[in-house]
Amino acid sequence: MATGRTVSRWTRLYADGYDLSSYTMSVGPLDYVFEEADLTTLGDAIRGVLPNKPGVKIGTLNGVFDNTATSGLHTVISGAGTYRTVMIPIGIRAEPAAGDPVFNGIFLQGAYQASGDGPVTVSVPFSDWYTSQIIAYSRPWGNLLHANSARTSAEGANTGSADVDGGASSSAGGYMAYQVFAGNGTATISVDDSANNSDWLALSGATTGSVDWSTVAGGLVALGTTATVRQYLRWQVAFGTATSITFALAFVRG
Amino acid sequence: MALAIATVTNSIASLSVSGVSIKDIHDIPPAALPLRTPVLFPDPLNFVSSFSMERNSYGGGSTAKMTVTYTLNYTFCFTPIGDGRNAGLDHYDEMVAKAALILDAILAIDTLSGAIDITPQSVVEFGPVPDPAGFMHLGCRLALTVQEFVN
Protein backbone atom coordinates (compact mmCIF):
# COMPACT_ATOMS: atom_id res chain seq x y z
CA MET A 1 0.00 0.00 0.00
CA ALA A 2 1.35 3.36 -0.99
CA THR A 3 0.75 6.38 1.21
CA GLY A 4 0.58 10.08 0.53
CA ARG A 5 -1.38 12.20 -1.90
CA THR A 6 -3.23 11.05 -4.96
CA VAL A 7 -5.35 12.26 -7.86
CA SER A 8 -8.93 11.51 -8.78
CA ARG A 9 -8.17 9.24 -11.71
CA TRP A 10 -7.20 6.48 -9.28
CA THR A 11 -10.65 6.51 -7.67
CA ARG A 12 -12.85 3.55 -8.56
CA LEU A 13 -16.60 3.18 -8.16
CA TYR A 14 -18.25 -0.20 -7.72
CA ALA A 15 -22.00 -0.66 -7.31
CA ASP A 16 -24.00 -3.87 -6.93
CA GLY A 17 -21.17 -5.93 -8.43
CA TYR A 18 -20.48 -3.63 -11.38
CA ASP A 19 -17.28 -1.71 -11.90
CA LEU A 20 -18.59 1.65 -13.11
CA SER A 21 -15.22 3.41 -12.98
CA SER A 22 -14.74 3.76 -16.72
CA TYR A 23 -18.15 5.42 -17.05
CA THR A 24 -17.75 7.74 -14.07
CA MET A 25 -16.42 11.27 -14.51
CA SER A 26 -16.75 12.28 -10.89
CA VAL A 27 -18.45 11.32 -7.66
CA GLY A 28 -18.83 13.13 -4.38
CA PRO A 29 -18.57 14.68 -1.99
CA LEU A 30 -18.07 11.54 0.09
CA ASP A 31 -19.89 12.83 3.13
CA TYR A 32 -19.57 11.66 6.71
CA VAL A 33 -21.22 14.54 8.55
CA PHE A 34 -22.59 14.74 12.07
CA GLU A 35 -25.62 16.81 12.94
CA GLU A 36 -24.84 19.33 15.63
CA ALA A 37 -27.04 19.32 18.72
CA ASP A 38 -26.95 22.86 20.08
CA LEU A 39 -26.68 22.72 23.89
CA THR A 40 -25.77 26.33 24.50
CA THR A 41 -27.06 27.72 27.77
CA LEU A 42 -27.64 31.32 28.77
CA GLY A 43 -24.47 31.25 30.83
CA ASP A 44 -22.19 30.04 28.05
CA ALA A 45 -19.86 32.58 26.51
CA ILE A 46 -19.92 30.78 23.17
CA ARG A 47 -22.22 28.36 21.43
CA GLY A 48 -21.65 24.74 22.48
CA VAL A 49 -22.62 21.66 20.51
CA LEU A 50 -22.50 17.89 20.66
CA PRO A 51 -22.41 15.51 17.69
CA ASN A 52 -25.80 13.97 16.95
CA LYS A 53 -26.44 11.25 14.37
CA PRO A 54 -24.12 11.29 11.37
CA GLY A 55 -25.18 11.22 7.76
CA VAL A 56 -23.26 9.24 5.18
CA LYS A 57 -23.60 10.01 1.47
CA ILE A 58 -21.66 9.71 -1.75
CA GLY A 59 -23.10 12.82 -3.34
CA THR A 60 -23.69 12.78 -7.07
CA LEU A 61 -22.22 10.44 -9.64
CA ASN A 62 -21.57 12.25 -12.92
CA GLY A 63 -20.94 9.87 -15.76
CA VAL A 64 -21.15 9.17 -19.46
CA PHE A 65 -24.31 7.76 -20.95
CA ASP A 66 -23.55 4.27 -22.26
CA ASN A 67 -25.99 1.48 -22.90
CA THR A 68 -23.47 -1.31 -23.44
CA ALA A 69 -25.22 -4.58 -22.64
CA THR A 70 -24.76 -5.85 -19.10
CA SER A 71 -22.13 -3.35 -17.97
CA GLY A 72 -22.94 0.11 -19.37
CA LEU A 73 -23.83 2.87 -16.93
CA HIS A 74 -27.29 3.29 -18.44
CA THR A 75 -27.87 -0.45 -18.36
CA VAL A 76 -26.82 -0.80 -14.75
CA ILE A 77 -28.29 2.19 -12.93
CA SER A 78 -30.92 3.87 -15.10
CA GLY A 79 -33.54 2.59 -12.67
CA ALA A 80 -33.83 5.15 -9.89
CA GLY A 81 -35.69 4.99 -6.60
CA THR A 82 -33.81 2.01 -5.27
CA TYR A 83 -30.72 1.35 -3.20
CA ARG A 84 -27.20 0.58 -4.38
CA THR A 85 -24.46 -1.11 -2.46
CA VAL A 86 -21.47 1.06 -3.23
CA MET A 87 -17.75 0.73 -2.69
CA ILE A 88 -15.40 3.59 -3.63
CA PRO A 89 -11.72 2.68 -3.22
CA ILE A 90 -9.18 5.46 -3.66
CA GLY A 91 -5.85 4.31 -5.07
CA ILE A 92 -2.76 6.18 -3.98
CA ARG A 93 -1.15 7.31 -7.24
CA ALA A 94 -1.91 3.88 -8.69
CA GLU A 95 -4.71 1.36 -9.07
CA PRO A 96 -6.32 0.69 -5.69
CA ALA A 97 -4.37 -1.92 -3.78
CA ALA A 98 -4.78 -3.77 -0.48
CA GLY A 99 -4.70 -1.31 2.40
CA ASP A 100 -5.97 1.67 0.43
CA PRO A 101 -8.91 3.73 1.78
CA VAL A 102 -12.42 2.67 0.78
CA PHE A 103 -15.75 4.45 1.29
CA ASN A 104 -18.66 2.01 1.72
CA GLY A 105 -22.39 2.09 2.15
CA ILE A 106 -25.86 1.30 0.88
CA PHE A 107 -27.48 4.42 -0.49
CA LEU A 108 -30.75 5.53 -2.02
CA GLN A 109 -30.32 6.38 -5.69
CA GLY A 110 -32.87 9.16 -5.92
CA ALA A 111 -32.72 9.93 -9.63
CA TYR A 112 -31.14 9.26 -13.01
CA GLN A 113 -30.84 12.35 -15.18
CA ALA A 114 -29.47 12.29 -18.74
CA SER A 115 -28.55 15.49 -20.57
CA GLY A 116 -25.93 17.05 -22.81
CA ASP A 117 -25.55 19.17 -25.92
CA GLY A 118 -22.49 17.28 -27.11
CA PRO A 119 -21.66 14.03 -25.37
CA VAL A 120 -24.68 12.73 -23.50
CA THR A 121 -23.92 12.58 -19.80
CA VAL A 122 -25.85 11.43 -16.78
CA SER A 123 -26.20 12.78 -13.28
CA VAL A 124 -27.07 10.28 -10.57
CA PRO A 125 -27.71 11.86 -7.16
CA PHE A 126 -27.49 9.58 -4.14
CA SER A 127 -29.12 10.29 -0.81
CA ASP A 128 -28.46 8.92 2.66
CA TRP A 129 -28.11 5.31 3.75
CA TYR A 130 -31.15 3.32 2.68
CA THR A 131 -33.31 2.87 5.73
CA SER A 132 -34.02 -0.86 5.42
CA GLN A 133 -30.29 -1.52 4.98
CA ILE A 134 -29.04 0.34 8.04
CA ILE A 135 -26.41 -1.56 10.00
CA ALA A 136 -25.09 -0.95 13.48
CA TYR A 137 -22.16 1.15 12.26
CA SER A 138 -21.95 4.70 11.00
CA ARG A 139 -18.36 4.75 9.77
CA PRO A 140 -18.08 4.55 5.99
CA TRP A 141 -14.29 4.55 5.67
CA GLY A 142 -12.37 1.28 5.79
CA ASN A 143 -9.49 -0.38 4.01
CA LEU A 144 -9.26 -2.56 0.97
CA LEU A 145 -8.31 -6.16 1.68
CA HIS A 146 -8.56 -7.41 -1.89
CA ALA A 147 -8.39 -5.19 -4.95
CA ASN A 148 -10.65 -5.89 -7.91
CA SER A 149 -9.09 -8.97 -9.49
CA ALA A 150 -9.78 -12.64 -10.14
CA ARG A 151 -8.92 -15.57 -7.91
CA THR A 152 -9.05 -19.14 -9.10
CA SER A 153 -9.65 -22.44 -7.42
CA ALA A 154 -6.24 -23.51 -8.70
CA GLU A 155 -4.68 -20.90 -6.43
CA GLY A 156 -6.66 -22.23 -3.46
CA ALA A 157 -6.93 -20.50 -0.12
CA ASN A 158 -5.04 -17.36 0.74
CA THR A 159 -1.94 -18.20 2.76
CA GLY A 160 -0.39 -14.77 2.42
CA SER A 161 0.43 -12.21 5.04
CA ALA A 162 -1.69 -9.29 6.20
CA ASP A 163 -3.42 -6.97 3.76
CA VAL A 164 -4.15 -4.47 6.52
CA ASP A 165 -2.40 -3.81 9.84
CA GLY A 166 -4.94 -2.16 12.10
CA GLY A 167 -2.23 -1.14 14.55
CA ALA A 168 -3.91 -2.98 17.43
CA SER A 169 -6.72 -5.34 18.22
CA SER A 170 -10.15 -3.73 18.62
CA SER A 171 -13.34 -4.83 20.38
CA ALA A 172 -15.94 -2.77 18.57
CA GLY A 173 -16.84 -5.11 15.75
CA GLY A 174 -16.95 -3.84 12.20
CA TYR A 175 -18.29 -4.85 8.84
CA MET A 176 -16.96 -6.30 5.63
CA ALA A 177 -17.98 -4.94 2.24
CA TYR A 178 -17.74 -6.95 -0.94
CA GLN A 179 -18.34 -6.52 -4.64
CA VAL A 180 -18.27 -9.60 -6.83
CA PHE A 181 -17.91 -8.72 -10.51
CA ALA A 182 -17.81 -12.18 -12.06
CA GLY A 183 -17.99 -15.82 -11.03
CA ASN A 184 -18.93 -19.21 -12.34
CA GLY A 185 -20.25 -21.05 -9.33
CA THR A 186 -20.27 -21.12 -5.56
CA ALA A 187 -17.59 -19.74 -3.28
CA THR A 188 -17.32 -18.23 0.18
CA ILE A 189 -15.62 -14.88 0.60
CA SER A 190 -14.48 -14.07 4.11
CA VAL A 191 -11.99 -12.23 6.29
CA ASP A 192 -9.19 -13.74 8.40
CA ASP A 193 -7.65 -12.00 11.37
CA SER A 194 -4.45 -12.54 13.29
CA ALA A 195 -2.70 -11.19 16.34
CA ASN A 196 0.80 -11.71 14.96
CA ASN A 197 0.50 -11.82 11.16
CA SER A 198 1.39 -15.50 11.11
CA ASP A 199 -1.30 -17.44 13.00
CA TRP A 200 -4.57 -16.85 11.18
CA LEU A 201 -8.18 -17.62 12.08
CA ALA A 202 -11.43 -16.91 10.31
CA LEU A 203 -12.92 -13.69 11.71
CA SER A 204 -16.19 -14.94 13.16
CA GLY A 205 -19.19 -13.63 11.23
CA ALA A 206 -17.19 -11.94 8.49
CA THR A 207 -18.27 -14.22 5.68
CA THR A 208 -20.67 -14.21 2.77
CA GLY A 209 -21.43 -17.88 3.25
CA SER A 210 -21.49 -20.05 0.17
CA VAL A 211 -23.04 -18.05 -2.67
CA ASP A 212 -23.42 -18.74 -6.38
CA TRP A 213 -21.57 -15.79 -7.91
CA SER A 214 -22.86 -16.43 -11.42
CA THR A 215 -24.96 -13.37 -10.63
CA VAL A 216 -22.85 -10.37 -9.71
CA ALA A 217 -23.56 -8.74 -6.37
CA GLY A 218 -22.43 -6.28 -3.75
CA GLY A 219 -23.13 -6.41 -0.04
CA LEU A 220 -22.15 -5.68 3.52
CA VAL A 221 -21.79 -8.19 6.36
CA ALA A 222 -21.82 -6.67 9.84
CA LEU A 223 -20.31 -8.22 12.96
CA GLY A 224 -21.61 -7.76 16.48
CA THR A 225 -20.73 -4.34 17.85
CA THR A 226 -18.52 -5.78 20.57
CA ALA A 227 -16.78 -8.38 18.43
CA THR A 228 -13.02 -8.62 18.77
CA VAL A 229 -11.11 -7.94 15.58
CA ARG A 230 -7.45 -8.73 15.91
CA GLN A 231 -4.70 -6.48 14.60
CA TYR A 232 -4.03 -7.99 11.18
CA LEU A 233 -6.59 -8.70 8.47
CA ARG A 234 -6.47 -10.53 5.17
CA TRP A 235 -8.94 -11.68 2.51
CA GLN A 236 -9.96 -15.31 2.18
CA VAL A 237 -11.86 -17.42 -0.35
CA ALA A 238 -13.12 -21.00 -0.11
CA PHE A 239 -14.11 -22.33 -3.52
CA GLY A 240 -17.17 -24.53 -3.92
CA THR A 241 -18.21 -25.19 -7.50
CA ALA A 242 -16.64 -21.98 -8.81
CA THR A 243 -13.27 -22.14 -10.48
CA SER A 244 -12.89 -18.37 -10.67
CA ILE A 245 -14.39 -15.30 -9.04
CA THR A 246 -13.49 -11.67 -9.54
CA PHE A 247 -14.08 -9.53 -6.48
CA ALA A 248 -13.11 -6.61 -4.28
CA LEU A 249 -13.23 -6.85 -0.49
CA ALA A 250 -12.93 -4.25 2.24
CA PHE A 251 -13.26 -4.13 6.01
CA VAL A 252 -14.36 -1.29 8.27
CA ARG A 253 -13.53 -1.50 11.96
CA GLY A 254 -16.20 -0.38 14.38
CA MET B 1 9.58 14.35 -3.02
CA ALA B 2 11.74 16.53 -5.24
CA LEU B 3 11.11 17.30 -8.87
CA ALA B 4 11.69 14.20 -10.94
CA ILE B 5 12.09 15.47 -14.48
CA ALA B 6 15.03 13.15 -15.11
CA THR B 7 13.04 10.19 -13.85
CA VAL B 8 10.13 11.14 -16.08
CA THR B 9 12.31 11.45 -19.19
CA ASN B 10 13.91 8.12 -18.34
CA SER B 11 10.45 6.57 -18.10
CA ILE B 12 9.46 8.04 -21.46
CA ALA B 13 12.65 6.68 -23.02
CA SER B 14 11.68 3.26 -21.69
CA LEU B 15 8.41 3.23 -23.61
CA SER B 16 8.24 0.57 -26.27
CA VAL B 17 7.14 1.72 -29.72
CA SER B 18 7.78 -0.67 -32.55
CA GLY B 19 10.41 0.65 -34.94
CA VAL B 20 11.03 3.88 -33.03
CA SER B 21 14.11 4.67 -30.97
CA ILE B 22 13.15 6.89 -28.01
CA LYS B 23 15.99 8.88 -26.51
CA ASP B 24 16.58 10.15 -22.97
CA ILE B 25 18.03 13.58 -22.14
CA HIS B 26 21.54 12.14 -21.82
CA ASP B 27 21.21 10.51 -25.19
CA ILE B 28 20.01 13.23 -27.56
CA PRO B 29 21.47 12.44 -30.98
CA PRO B 30 23.60 15.23 -32.51
CA ALA B 31 21.93 14.33 -35.80
CA ALA B 32 19.15 11.94 -36.72
CA LEU B 33 20.49 11.07 -40.14
CA PRO B 34 23.18 8.55 -39.10
CA LEU B 35 20.73 6.61 -36.96
CA ARG B 36 18.91 5.31 -40.04
CA THR B 37 15.84 4.77 -37.91
CA PRO B 38 12.83 6.78 -36.78
CA VAL B 39 13.82 8.55 -33.59
CA LEU B 40 11.97 10.51 -30.90
CA PHE B 41 14.22 12.74 -28.84
CA PRO B 42 13.96 15.63 -26.36
CA ASP B 43 14.11 19.03 -28.05
CA PRO B 44 17.44 20.53 -26.97
CA LEU B 45 15.89 23.97 -27.32
CA ASN B 46 12.99 24.59 -24.93
CA PHE B 47 12.80 20.98 -23.75
CA VAL B 48 10.96 22.05 -20.58
CA SER B 49 8.36 24.77 -20.99
CA SER B 50 5.14 26.11 -19.44
CA PHE B 51 6.38 25.36 -15.94
CA SER B 52 3.87 26.23 -13.23
CA MET B 53 3.58 25.49 -9.55
CA GLU B 54 0.52 25.52 -7.33
CA ARG B 55 1.03 25.59 -3.59
CA ASN B 56 -1.50 23.20 -2.03
CA SER B 57 -0.79 23.61 1.67
CA TYR B 58 0.83 25.83 4.24
CA GLY B 59 4.52 25.53 4.98
CA GLY B 60 7.90 26.44 3.65
CA GLY B 61 9.31 25.12 0.43
CA SER B 62 10.68 22.00 2.08
CA THR B 63 7.35 20.95 3.59
CA ALA B 64 4.45 22.55 1.71
CA LYS B 65 2.52 20.29 -0.61
CA MET B 66 2.90 21.53 -4.17
CA THR B 67 1.61 20.46 -7.54
CA VAL B 68 3.94 21.17 -10.42
CA THR B 69 2.93 21.09 -14.05
CA TYR B 70 5.24 21.46 -17.03
CA THR B 71 5.52 20.57 -20.67
CA LEU B 72 8.19 18.35 -22.19
CA ASN B 73 8.83 18.94 -25.87
CA TYR B 74 9.98 16.17 -28.17
CA THR B 75 10.81 15.95 -31.86
CA PHE B 76 10.08 12.91 -33.96
CA CYS B 77 12.28 12.43 -37.02
CA PHE B 78 11.04 9.68 -39.28
CA THR B 79 13.11 9.94 -42.45
CA PRO B 80 15.30 12.60 -44.07
CA ILE B 81 13.58 14.95 -46.45
CA GLY B 82 14.60 13.85 -49.91
CA ASP B 83 14.63 10.19 -49.05
CA GLY B 84 12.68 8.10 -51.56
CA ARG B 85 11.52 9.06 -55.01
CA ASN B 86 9.15 11.81 -53.99
CA ALA B 87 11.32 13.96 -51.72
CA GLY B 88 10.27 11.93 -48.71
CA LEU B 89 6.57 12.38 -49.16
CA ASP B 90 6.19 8.78 -50.25
CA HIS B 91 6.96 7.94 -46.60
CA TYR B 92 4.41 10.37 -45.21
CA ASP B 93 1.82 7.71 -44.41
CA GLU B 94 4.42 5.62 -42.60
CA MET B 95 5.49 8.66 -40.59
CA VAL B 96 1.92 9.39 -39.54
CA ALA B 97 1.43 5.75 -38.58
CA LYS B 98 4.55 5.81 -36.38
CA ALA B 99 3.54 9.11 -34.80
CA ALA B 100 0.18 7.54 -33.98
CA LEU B 101 1.96 4.57 -32.39
CA ILE B 102 3.96 6.97 -30.21
CA LEU B 103 0.77 8.73 -29.13
CA ASP B 104 -0.90 5.39 -28.47
CA ALA B 105 1.97 4.40 -26.19
CA ILE B 106 1.64 7.66 -24.26
CA LEU B 107 -2.14 7.45 -24.02
CA ALA B 108 -1.85 3.89 -22.72
CA ILE B 109 0.38 4.84 -19.79
CA ASP B 110 -1.18 3.85 -16.48
CA THR B 111 1.58 4.94 -14.16
CA LEU B 112 4.83 6.65 -15.06
CA SER B 113 7.68 6.60 -12.61
CA GLY B 114 8.32 10.14 -11.40
CA ALA B 115 5.03 11.63 -12.57
CA ILE B 116 1.49 11.73 -11.26
CA ASP B 117 0.08 12.10 -14.75
CA ILE B 118 1.26 12.56 -18.31
CA THR B 119 -0.90 13.56 -21.24
CA PRO B 120 -0.21 14.60 -24.82
CA GLN B 121 -0.77 18.34 -25.01
CA SER B 122 -0.26 18.88 -28.72
CA VAL B 123 1.19 17.35 -31.84
CA VAL B 124 2.29 20.03 -34.26
CA GLU B 125 4.38 20.70 -37.34
CA PHE B 126 3.60 17.49 -39.14
CA GLY B 127 6.00 17.75 -42.08
CA PRO B 128 9.61 18.91 -42.22
CA VAL B 129 11.24 19.20 -38.79
CA PRO B 130 14.93 19.73 -38.06
CA ASP B 131 17.14 17.33 -36.13
CA PRO B 132 19.66 18.89 -33.69
CA ALA B 133 22.15 19.38 -36.54
CA GLY B 134 19.58 21.27 -38.59
CA PHE B 135 18.97 18.56 -41.17
CA MET B 136 15.35 18.44 -42.17
CA HIS B 137 13.37 15.27 -41.63
CA LEU B 138 9.84 14.21 -42.18
CA GLY B 139 8.30 14.07 -38.71
CA CYS B 140 6.51 16.15 -36.11
CA ARG B 141 6.83 17.73 -32.70
CA LEU B 142 5.10 16.42 -29.58
CA ALA B 143 4.38 18.34 -26.40
CA LEU B 144 3.63 16.27 -23.30
CA THR B 145 2.08 17.75 -20.18
CA VAL B 146 3.48 16.29 -16.97
CA GLN B 147 2.09 16.71 -13.47
CA GLU B 148 4.15 16.01 -10.37
CA PHE B 149 3.54 16.23 -6.64
CA VAL B 150 6.35 17.86 -4.67
CA ASN B 151 6.49 17.01 -0.93
Image: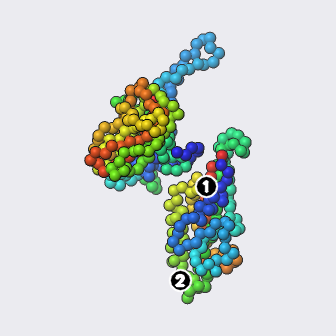
- Labels in figure, total: 2
Task: Judge left or right: residue B68 versus residue A105.
Answer: right
* Percent of width and height locating residue B43: 67, 68
Q: Looking at numbered disc 1 in the image, what kind of residue is underneath it?
A: Gly
Under tag 1, what secondary structure?
loop
**Residue sitting farthest toward the right:** B60
Q: Quadrant of residue B51?
A: bottom right
**Residue sitting farthest toward the bottom:** B85
Q: Quadrant of residue B71?
A: bottom right
Residue bearing the label numbered 1: B114
* Percent of width and height locating residue A93: 55, 49
Under tag 2, what secondary structure?
helix
Q: Earlier in the sequence, mark 1 or mark 2?
A: 2
Kindly identify the residue that appears in the image at 66 percent across and 73 percent down. B29
Q: Is residue A189 visible?
A: yes
Q: Looking at numbered disc 2 in the image, what kind of residue is underneath it?
A: Asp
Q: Say which of marks 1 and 2 sits in front.
A: 1
Other residues around mark 2 within 10 Å, as few (<14) / some (14–19) / many (≥20): few
Q: Nearer the viewer, residue A174 or A162?
A: A162
- Of all chains, the one bearing label 2 is B
Q: Does residue B85 sit above or below B120 in this rendering? A: below
* Percent of width and height locating residue A210: 29, 40
Task: Judge left or right: residue A230 versus residue B6.
Answer: left
Kindly identify the residue that appears in the image at 55 percent across and 65 percent down. B15
Q: Is residue A141 visible?
A: no
Q: Which mark is residue B90?
A: 2
- Of all chains, the one bearing label 1 is B
Kindly identify the residue that appears in the image at 67 percent across and 70 percent down. B28
Gap between marks 1 and 2, in whole Å?
A: 39 Å
Q: Does residue B68 sit above or below A27 in this rendering? A: below
Q: Nearer the viewer, residue A171 or A135?
A: A171
**Residue sitting farthest toward the front:** A199
